[in-house]
Image (cartoon, rainbow, N blue to C red):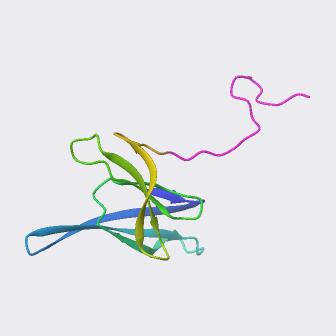
Amino acid sequence: MSKINDSLVVLSHHCIVTNSTPKPFCDVLMMLKNGVPKPSFTELFTVNDVGLNSMIGFRKNGQPIIDQTKTHGYDGELEVYNLCSERINGLGIYGSLFRMTSYKESLLLLNHSDSIIHS
């Protein structure tokens, strides 16, 4: 599970074997806010050649950010899937382990007990 803007998305990883070659892909499904008691999901897009747990988050515009760390753990690069061209492009950020989390800007101060800004 992840989120795009303020909407819940589910990442559904699959793998099809063709000619003894595994072809991984990931469907991105968004929960609809349609006022019905039972939540429903719609498929937004599919990203091909994406391994399990390699899609680590989304940009503000909804483009997926992918961790292409190799199996030995040292030749990784963050990449972005371009929704229009359906191509994966490198961001030029290299490393061995990437994690991503969302945040929300706030005027509240964490180190003050009343969490109010005084002027």
- Residue, far right: 119
Q: Residue at x 76, y 29 (%)?
A: 115
Q: Position of residue 10 (x, y in %)?
A: 41, 63
Give above or below for 107 relative to 11. Answer: above
- Does residue 109 belong to the magenta stretch? yes
- For the stretch drawn in magenta, the main secondary structure is loop
Q: Quadrant of residue 27?
A: bottom left
In the image, 41 versus 27, the foreground residue is 27
User: Front-most of 23 and 87?
Assistant: 87
Mark count: 0
Query: Picture coordinates of residue 46 (x, y %)?
Result: 38, 73
Q: Which quarter of the rendered picture does the C terminus lie within?
A: top right
Residue 87 on image: x %, y %: 41, 70
Quadrant assignment, res 99: top left
Residue shown at the point (58%, 64%) measured from the top left: 61
Task: Say which residue appears at 46% left-offset and 76% top-offset.
Answer: 85
Pick whichever, 105 or 92, lies toward us. 92
Q: Which residues are magenta?
A: 101-119
Quick check: 109 above or below 40?
Answer: above
In this orientation, which residue lies closer to the viewer: 109 or 86? Answer: 86
The percent position of residue 104, horizontal first and vertical second, equals 65, 46
Determine the residue located farthest toward the front in the rendered image. Answer: 92
Query: Is 99 on the left-hand or right-hand side of 69?
Result: right
Please say if 21 is above or below 57.
Answer: below
Q: Which quadrant of the figure contains the N terminus?
A: bottom left
Figure check: 7 above or below 36: above
